[in-house]
Image (tube, rainbow, N blue to C red):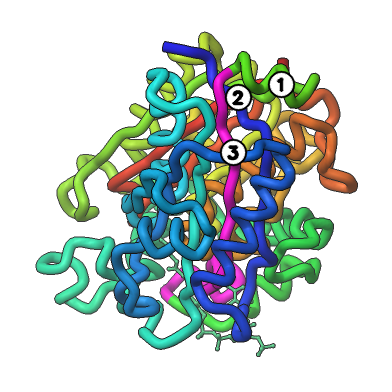
Amino acid sequence: MRDVAVIGIGMTQFGELWGKSIKDIFVEAASKAIKNSGVDHIDSMYVGSMSSGLFVGQEHLGAVLADYLGQTPIPSTRVESACASGGAAFRAAYFEVASGASDIVLAGGIEKMTDGADATDALATAADQEYEVYQGVTFPGLYAMIANAHMNQYGTTREQLAAIAVKNHRNGANNPNAQFRTPITLEQVMNSTLVADPLRLLDCSPVSDGGAAVILCSMDIAKKFTDTIIKIKGTAQASDTIALHSRKSLTTLNSVVTAAQKAYKMAGVTPKDINFAEVHDCFTIAEAVVYEDLGFCEKGCGGPAAQEGRTAIDGKTPLNTSGGLKSKGHPVGATGIAQIIELYEQLTGQAGKRQVKNAHIGLAQNMGGSGASCVINILEAK
Ligand code: COA
């Protein structure tokens, strides 16, 4: 397999984009990525989208977006893995370049969630219909069960979860593309509206519109365009039971553990080598559990890590410097690609006030549902 690099990025503002259609949003992000990379063509494209059919009534998205981007007749494929669709699209693009089938490939992600359908119901289609959704539980409820189990098993506190939201809003305040650029306090999180006990409004990622795209190419081509080579060092994907009740433990996400082991092996690194990470904080408890399952610390220390500043920008392992899903927003299909964009900006020293010192290796962890799918990508500045 050939070495593959990321050479260009582009994304839209995340938020409630009332004036823009799904096509407008994608074309804006993808055009920015193509321009940013400097390439004069792309050979192929993959687009992550969880549920454009339910959200805006548009399927056949690969073809629709290639058409509006002016890229027909290149192959264009929509990739779906619930909220991990963006990460999965990036992985598909990686393999197309690594295999030698194409030289330059666009990996994008898109979701337009604020038009039309009830977002909670549409999102819940990623959970087990018979055993979870039919009984009335949706994603805030599923993650609330994980939070209660984690609190019970490890003594994780409400304050520790709130510290994750506070940290991510602090980071997002410095991200011009973030949906919520307002710093928040511990008290605001603890007193926000209860959504699913113990999770409150400010523990939840929002409902968002947004698009993101990156350009991947073979290493030989990358060297012609830039001196700052961002290499894809590892990529892995794993799955787990769709329903929480089928798992041995509610407090370990097996798809994260498995994908991390494989990605570390491919990259030839251990958690200690990762300088910073973007992780899937769809709810604050998710960031705590994922931090542990990525092997950054022992089980149970995900809560204290945030409270003690270990995951802050100047901490030992900065997490979600972009603001994460919590503050940057979570247009589900776009999230995995937006994570890669934050890695790229950090690794190329373009993250401004969010810049992590000595950022050489970054990890992006993107997750579908309550962890039934997980994609991990590791990037390195060469
Ligand atoms: N973080 C911060 N502020 C938020 C917010 C969030 N997650 N969600 C909404 N707000 C703000 C809104 O901007 C609004 O502020 P305003 O009154 O100043 O305009 C206010 O809170 C109320 O917003 P509203 O849209 O009425 O909230 P809601 O009750 O309809 O939705 C949630 C709130 C938490 C239920 C919804 O955002 C949600 O379901 N999030 C989870 C999404 C999800 O499950 N994603 C997939 C994960 S696997």
Going by the numbered disc 1, the residue's amino acid type is Ile
Do the CB atoms of the residues marked 1 and 2 lie less than 8 Å apart? yes
Q: Residue at x 39, y 49 (%)?
A: 73
Q: Give the mark, 1 or 3, whose residue is nearer the N terminus.
A: 3
Q: Residue at x 65, y 39 (%)?
A: 40
Residue that numbered label 3 is attached to:
215
Going by the numbered disc 3, the residue's amino acid type is Ile
Question: In the image, is 3 to the left or to the right of 116?
Answer: right
Farthest right residue? 353
Question: In the image, is 95 to the left or to the right of 223?
Answer: left
186 within the magenta span: no
Residue 229 numbered mark, or none: 1
Asked which secondary structure carries label 3, the reply is: strand
User: Against 75, is 142 above or below?
Assistant: below
Residue 5 numbered mark, or none: 2
- Magenta residues (range): 196-218
